[in-house]
Amino acid sequence: MKMITSAQQLHQWLNLAGKSDFLAPLLLRLFLAPVFLSAGFTKIAAFESTVEWFGNAEWGLGLPLPWLMAFLATAVELVGGFLLLFGLATRYITIPLMITMLVAIFSVHWDNGWFAIAPSNPDTSMAQPLAAIGIPAAENSLANSAEVGVRLNEARDILYEYGDYERLTDKGNIVILNNGIEFAATYFIMLLSLFFTGAGRLVSVDYWIVCWLNRSQHSEDSMQTAEQPASGLACD
């Protein structure tokens, strides 16, 4: 019985976290906004090259109407980044942003597997448990990790012999970019969460717009029924 009471008290304490439920969507927005703004500004700074990459089938995406597609992708990222930052029209903008992520996943990253940065040690790879149960893609990932490790060791040997290895790596280790779906899929999941939850309370423009609309509607209903408007109307 004492254990049940303690569990109930713990549950009540955990429920208090609901008062800070706005923090999760806020942090998602603050994480995603600079990602999309950076991507959009990068595209617009070299827009001609972006158009070429969208249209070229040999070394790019090979998409039809490359100028239009590049313009739409750039506009969605820039506008979406600012809207996420301020929490305005959040659910609406997540839709084109999620579509952008799906296009990136299937047209750019899919053939490269999951990892954005290739693991170089099969023994510590996240693919290890999946390979243990016989999933072919995970087994291929472990084989790729072994090859990545060999090539990184060769690169380190070259740098040790012909370069200043300590200076070249004092800002970070040498890695091989795999360019898999990891980042795009993660951003998609974050956007999907915002699609369902919205921008969150208190620190989003959406929240205060809803507050204003609710108060306006309440005032109209009160006038029609000759009732005095209530103060402190909830905006959830």
Image: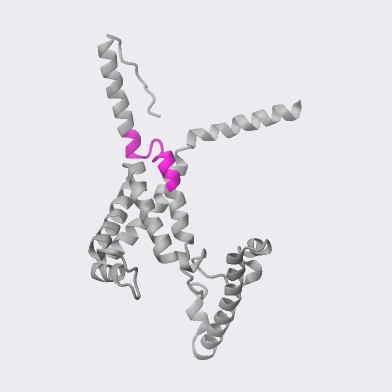
Question: Residue 81's x, y, as percent?
Answer: 33, 52
Q: Is residue 28 above or below residue 217?
A: below
Q: Is residue 93 above or below residue 215?
A: below
Q: Residue furthest top?
A: 226
Q: Quadrant of the C terminus?
A: top left
Q: Residue at x 53, y 70 (%)?
A: 118
Question: Residue 82's x, y, as percent?
Answer: 30, 50
Question: Residue 50's x, y, as percent?
Answer: 28, 68
Left or right: 4 in relation to 43: right
Q: Residue at x 36, y 42 (%)?
A: 91
Q: Quadrant of the N terminus?
A: top right
Left or right: 57 in relation to 159: left
Q: Residue furthest right?
A: 1
Q: Is residue 86 above or below residue 77?
A: above
Way the structure is coloured: one colour
Residue 64 is one of the magenta-drawn residues: no
The part of the chain drawn in magenta is 192-208
Instruction: Between residue 136 and residue 195, name the one nearer to us.
Output: 136
Q: Residue at x 30, y 54 (%)?
A: 76
Q: Residue at x 35, y 75 (%)?
A: 59
Instruction: Between residue 76 and residue 52, name the one nearer to us.
Output: 52
